[in-house]
Amino acid sequence: MGAFDSYDASSTSTSVSLQDTPSRPRSTSSLSSMDADSPLDTVDKNSRKVDMSDKVDFVDALNTALAAKSKNLGMVDTYGNEFHLPDFTIKQIRDAIPAHCYVRSGLRGLSYVVRDIAFLAAIFTLFHLFLTPENVPSKITRGLLWTVYTFLQGLFATGLWVLAHECGHQSFSPSKTLNDTVGFICHSALLVPYFSWKISHGKHHKSTGHMERDMVFVPKTREQFASKIGYYVHELSELAEETPIATAGTLLGQQLMGWIMYISTNVTGHNSHLRQKEGRGIGKQNGFGGGVNHFNPSSPLYEAKDAKLILASDVGLAVVFGTLLLIGKNFGWANLAVWYFLPYLWVNHWLGKHSLRTDLINSNLAQLPSHIFSIPMASFPTITTMYGTSLAALLRPSIAI
């Protein structure tokens, strides 16, 4: 949306409300003022630090204690369980989070940027200087070691991507100027149109889970599958989805090209562009040549006031592409592919993996129609992606992506 902290609601489909819970008195101010006996009181009133001695899982307590208070509209989730709509507010969620989680530090953020760039430079230097035919005569061994290189570079480049993502959310530091400068440089270096994505991503977080307005993922409805062609396509997909070839093809396309397809064609986002208030969506639709992408200042994803920022993003990409062309021309296209583009595909893989595991494009989570949609209701259910301690430290994952 942040670059990958989260509440685990992977058991969801039972959404919850923060307004009434057993074992604690009602609070009219915030969740942080609850009685100390409450299983949800994980914040010390004086220090506002997380009480790690409290063994009760925060989200499990919410789901268990509050689901009974939600209104049941007769809906079911993808597992057939009753789906309860939450009725808590954004303020209640924010008050439940320890105060130190909101502290932004430009110095700390820059230290992460310097760390990632230093590792990227060090890894490149080591492999370039020592992984030569003189030092490693075997082509197979060199190939395997350069494969390790692409994986390592992909990890640190993804960490850099995530830091730029935080800049887009203005959570990198208290300074908007610093945030946008760092984000623009880091994302452009990774072929991401920083301002274009920042704007559409902000809109995504305002409509996550909305069946008509989500900027990232809108699943097909039963009605859309009702046409004869849609039915046969669906049936064919159902028959082939478990076959190794279909699974491998879908996985490769999704993990390696999903991000590129999204920013180029808005492939998984909503296609209701006629609703664009300035009329910019007339005659435009998702897909190649449809006029809906992250590079066109007249794209219906944006308003007229955003045009300069979209162009600035394009200029950043042009500079990086020009630099890559010079590198390829002077050092060889095969070298450029190994040095840059294969690590770039690893970055796409991690983005795709994370997106599919969280609220971005996961059909196991609630997608809500307009008449019952609200930001708290749609945004609270998420799925935690577990990478392991070491990998998480490199990727710095956050659910807000």
Image: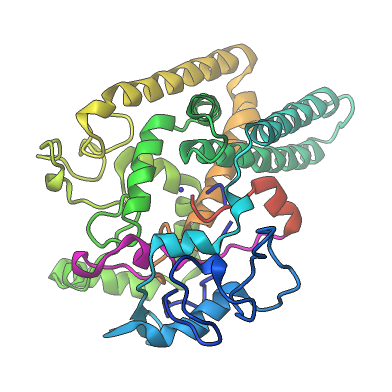
Q: Is residue 284 visible?
A: yes
| Residue 18 image position (x, y, % from top left) | 45, 74
From the viewer's perspective, is residue 93 above or below residue 53?
A: above
Q: Which residues are magenta?
A: 366-388
Q: Which of these two is toward me, 286 or 236?
A: 286
| Residue 230 image position (x, y, % from top left) | 20, 67
Q: Which of these two is toward me, 18 or 350?
A: 18
Q: Which of these two is toward me, 214 or 175?
A: 175
State the scheme by which the image is colored.
rainbow
| Residue 369 image position (x, y, % from top left) | 22, 67
Residue positioned 12% across, 36% down in the render: 278
Q: Is residue 358 visible?
A: no
Residue positioned 74% across, 58% down in the render: 389
Residue 381 part of the magenta-drawn span: yes
Main SS class of the magenta portion in the image: loop
Q: Which of these two is toward me, 77 or 339?
A: 77
Residue 380 part of the magenta-drawn span: yes
**Horizontal arrangement in the rendering, residue 180 relative to residue 44 (left or right):** left
**Horizontal arrangement in the rendering, residue 218 relative to residue 230 (left or right):** right
From the viewer's perspective, is residue 208 above or below residue 38?
A: above
